[in-house]
DNA sequence: AATGAATGAGCCTTCATTCAT
DNA sequence: GATGAATGAAGGCTCATTCAT
């Protein structure tokens, strides 16, 4: 345990430990002492580097998000919209299925979902908004509509919520439902299903005007 | 207000209060004192009647479970399958939008999801299975297929996950996404969207065999 | 250390200890642990009985005030106003000179004076106001004026501030200034001086209108 | 902004900051970090330059003392004694009303009063004695008496204690008592009141021998 | 049977101080 | 000489739990 480091070193160790512990235990159950212990740092370190537990939590969210989120695919305008949606869904599903940093993010997300701390509110929209816009554009092209009308928003929700199944259902339950282990191949088949299901859905909605 | 009650009375009031509080706050954040206060009971009552907080939590789960499992609508075999799906989705959405027992159950479930206590595994399947079967049958009819092949299971997941949006996204976020308050009318429009989106999806999947 | 008391017993012991400790140390330096220790109570007792340290402080103020403040003399309307003032001043000076509860009050007062906690604000006026009114009436009669004009308020301040010398100067300094120990007899002579000094002052102010 | 200063520069800045902070907050509530921050110095500076917080406190006292002892007005022997008293009181009141060094000193003094550190005993007399002598002389002339008899000492206390009201009552309370904000004009009227009140008092005491 | 007084363990935070550089 | 990273000690508060009554 080196007595004197760069300062950024210790800070980073604490942040990493915080990502782990918050993901494992949730905000309430996570103990500052535990985080510091894992980081090999003094209990007062959290206050020294981050101010308090809440600020550390927020930064842990950002860090986890950064670590787990794949960069947005550059969309080739020549690709047919159907294939753009396919690529988007596959990419999202692979992110969600990833056990590493993604697992941490998922747990953070679920905990926040179940028992909002209110600390993430602003952060959330900032993180989510850019990804959303890409999907909305794709859906608009597929539906053959302009503007942000309700039908487009509803379609976006349909797509996202299907992909999120990987997050909001426990692995065990998912495997129970499907009767087989969640292999990479299964993920791929699932993504393909969602793509086709959604393409049909979007086109059906887009064709006739929303009731 | 009888000064000396049956004992069972107090126990029940505490249990009801516990269902509320655990659902609202989660296990950790729920305070025994709060539960007792809402139940109009003494602080020592939880330990007296249930042993400790953990035991109360378990019983609250079972109680909530019992309260929320609404009876399934009897399906009229003469109704066209499309309308059966429509009815199923509208019923589910209304359940999910309901703040009452169903909401409580969902919150408990999400907490368990994020930080499993390992308690409710069995309960879960018992609750879910019967409802599932109904939906699977409807989907099979719409898709025009027999047997539990993967495509049917996938479609079921697509339908369910769309409906679950009401549960797995926070109200605030949902209203942010949609740009309007979550009124009963909006719920209805959303249910209708999911119905049409899913009908198209199911039929697309059912028609041509899985990719 | 009895395990089980009336409940009011322990509370009172803590309150008394708090009066002592707050007076000795001031709000900041007073330690809850110290108070509880002196009261023979658990550290959590302060929270249990009073909510928090601040609430205990307020109650300690009230308690100390109650213990130290002599009841208001009933004013005999037939007594000449000059003698009423004399009685008022002597009573006040004796209160201030009193070593017992008064000493505690004085220390609380001085600490609050030097470093306001802001906790006493409302309390202060409630405690002080009734006593003030009596003095104002006496001064009005002596000055031969009606109404609450500025001159009367100024005179009240002159009287009070002279009496407060006993509080706002340290014993040692006071004795140094006067060249003699602060005996009861000296207090009496001082009170008499203030009376005559003030009578002349009030009458001078009252006679010619305020510049 | 030189990156490497003389060292004495920093020391002085810390000392000045300490005077401010100790006066505002008192010894306990004053934070070393706050002092260093205001001085634009490193957190370790206090210990580096002064050893520890207590030593800094002592030096801050001495510094404040030095800064606040305004030179006495030279008394013109031809001025009538009444006007000398008037000038003395007005000067003192303006000092006391001043937010600057004098205010700092007063707050430090009151803190010491309430919870003596036993530090400033000697300082005090050195500061007070010369000013006292001037006032005693004036009073003697007005009273028409020689020698330091008790009546003169009492009168001095009466005058001083009235002036000190500005210090020993919180602004808020003072404004509450007077029903108006503490403007420079009010200070002047108050000084004039004290002058006239005291002139009458002194003459009354001086005329007939002490009761 | 049921209560409320009382507690101990533990958490987050503050803060003066230290020490390698 | 001067700094900033790091810490230990302690403080206020929370809360589930216990136990005499």
Image: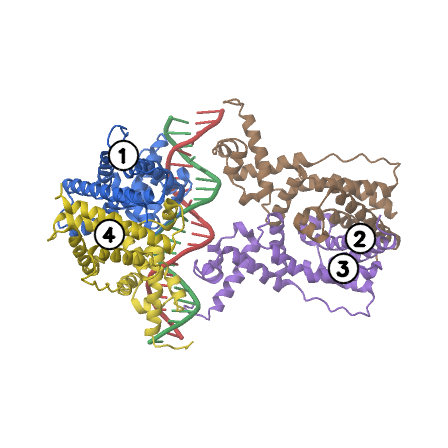
Chain colours: A purple, B brown, C blue, D yellow, E red, F green
* Front of the two marks 4 and 3: 4
Q: Do labels 4 and 3 share a chain?
A: no
Helix, strand or loop at disc 2? helix
- Left or right: B10 as drawn, with respect to D53: right
Per the image, the residue denoted by label 4 is D160
- Left or right: A31 as drawn, with respect to A144: left
What is the crowding at mark 4: few (fewer than 14 residues within 10 Å), some, or many (at least 20)?
Answer: many
Residue, far front: C208
Contact check, label 2 and label 1, Cβ < 8 Å: no
- Left or right: C125 as drawn, with respect to A13: left
- Left or right: B34 as drawn, with respect to C97: right
Contact check, label 4 and label 3, Cβ < 8 Å: no
Per the image, the residue denoted by label 3 is A136
Per the image, the residue denoted by label 1 is C70
Residue shown at the point (38%, 67%) measured from the top left: D39
Q: To which chain does the residue with label 4 belong?
A: D
Q: Do labels 1 and 3 share a chain?
A: no
């Amino acid at each position: 345990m080196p007595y004197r480091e760069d300062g950024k070193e210790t800070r980073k160790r604490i942040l990493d430990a915080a990502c782990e512990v918050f993901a494992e235990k949730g905000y309430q159950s996570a103990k500052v002492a535990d985080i510091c212990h894992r980081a090999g740092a003094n209990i007062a370190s959290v206050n020294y580097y981050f101010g308090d537990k809440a600020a550390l939590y927020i930064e842990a969210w950002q860090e986890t998000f950064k670590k787990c989120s794949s960069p947005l695919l550059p969309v080739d305008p020549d690709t047919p919209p159907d294939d753009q949606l396919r690529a988007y869904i596959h990419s999202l599903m692979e992110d969600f299925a990833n056990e590493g940093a993604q697992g941490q993010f998922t747990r953070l997300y679920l905990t926040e979902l179940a028992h909002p701390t209110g600390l993430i509110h602003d952060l959330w929209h900032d993180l989510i908004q850019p990804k959303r816009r890409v999907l909305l554009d794709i859906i608009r092209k597929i539906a053959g509509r302009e503007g942000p009308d309700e039908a487009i928003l509803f379609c976006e929700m349909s797509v996202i919520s299907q992909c999120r199944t990987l997050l909001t259902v426990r692995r065990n339950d998912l495997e129970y439902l499907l009767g087989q282990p969640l292999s990479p191949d299964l993920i791929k088949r699932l993504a393909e299903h969602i793509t086709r299901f959604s393409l049909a859905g979007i086109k059906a909605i887009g064709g006739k005007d929303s009731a």
